Amino acid sequence: MTAESLKQTAVTEFTNPNLSILYSADDIEARIDVLGRQITADYQGRDLVLVGVLKGSCVFMADLMRAIDLPMKIDFMAVSSYKDGTVSTGDVEILKDLSNPIRGKDVLVVEDIIDTGLTLTRLLDILGSRGANSIKLASFLDKPEPRINKELKLDYTGFVIPNEFVVGYGLDAAGRYRNLPFIGVVKNPAEA
Ligand code: IMP
Ligand code: MG
């Protein structure tokens, strides 16, 4: 085997055999194009601000904003949900607040994934007291099975997924895998 072909077959972060691809980069691009068109149609003449929830939403945010053909602004919040192992407790601490007021604005909160829904419920409570004209929610993934707050309404969803732990496209496992250009399932978490 030549050095060149060895390089091509080498296992890398993106070709890790412990990952199975759920949505490819092409699947994601096509879906975001549709979401961008919907949001562009729905927010004509509005005062749109996308609020990304760090860190998980950063990749979705970057793609979604470029699919929205409207005058708009962006802002970010960082929250930490206190988790008991991998189970959300619903307590949310604001690590970074918005840079600008949202009074009178049409806010679209951009999340990576809604699981129990407790983080977003708390975040929407906090943002709800700030006088925005409207607050809606766009989540790249919706994992409805573990949902605790069944009332939580997603206005825009990329993909509805089964109750599995997924990584990539901004989503992490212990900080790793956010840079994967696809959504994958870790087959054997012990080997991750
Ligand atoms: P929730 O309060 O349970 O809805 O928590 C949502 C947060 O948990 C997301 O913003 C993610 O940071 C994290 N999370 C939930 N499910 C997954 C997953 O399958 N992969 C990676 N992170 C996840
Ligand atoms: Mg998150």
Image (cartoon, rainbow, N blue to C red):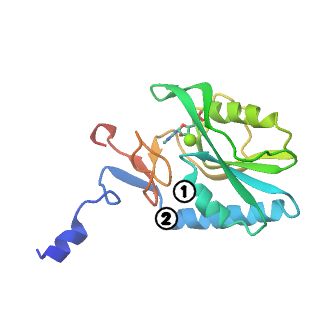
Q: Residue at x 57, y 45 (%)?
A: 54
Question: Label 2's element?
Answer: helix
Tell me: is circle 1 under 8 Å from ligand 2: no
Q: In which quarter of the image is residue 144?
A: top right
Question: Label 1's element?
Answer: helix
Instruction: Say which quadrant the C terminus sits in.
Output: top left
Q: Where is residue 56 in the image (x, y as percent from the top left)?
A: 54, 47
Tell me the amino acid under the disc marked 1.
Val
Q: Relative to 18, is 71 on the left or the right? A: right
Classify mark 1: residues with Cα within 10 Å, few (<14), some (14-19) or many (20+): many
Classify mark 2: residues with Cα within 10 Å, few (<14), some (14-19) or many (20+): few
Instruction: Say which quadrant the N terminus sits in.
Output: bottom left
For the residues labelled 1 and 2, the Cα–Cα distance comes to 12 Å
Tell me the quadrant of ligand 1: top right
Q: Position of residue 84 (x, y in %)?
A: 48, 23
Residue that lies at the very extreme toward the left in this rendered image? 1
Q: Is 63 rendered above or below residue 57?
A: below
Which numbered mark, 1 or 2, is in the foreground of this view?
1
Q: Residue at x 88, y 47 (%)?
A: 104
Q: Relative to 148, is 168 on the left or the right? A: left
Q: Position of residue 124 (x, y in %)?
A: 73, 36
Q: Where is residue 134 in the image (x, y as percent from the top left)?
A: 84, 46
Residue underneath mark 1:
59
Residue underneath mark 2:
25
Q: Which residue is drawn at 67% across and 62% down?
A: 65
Tell me the amino acid under the disc marked 2.
Ala
Q: Earlier in the sequence, mark 1 or mark 2?
A: 2
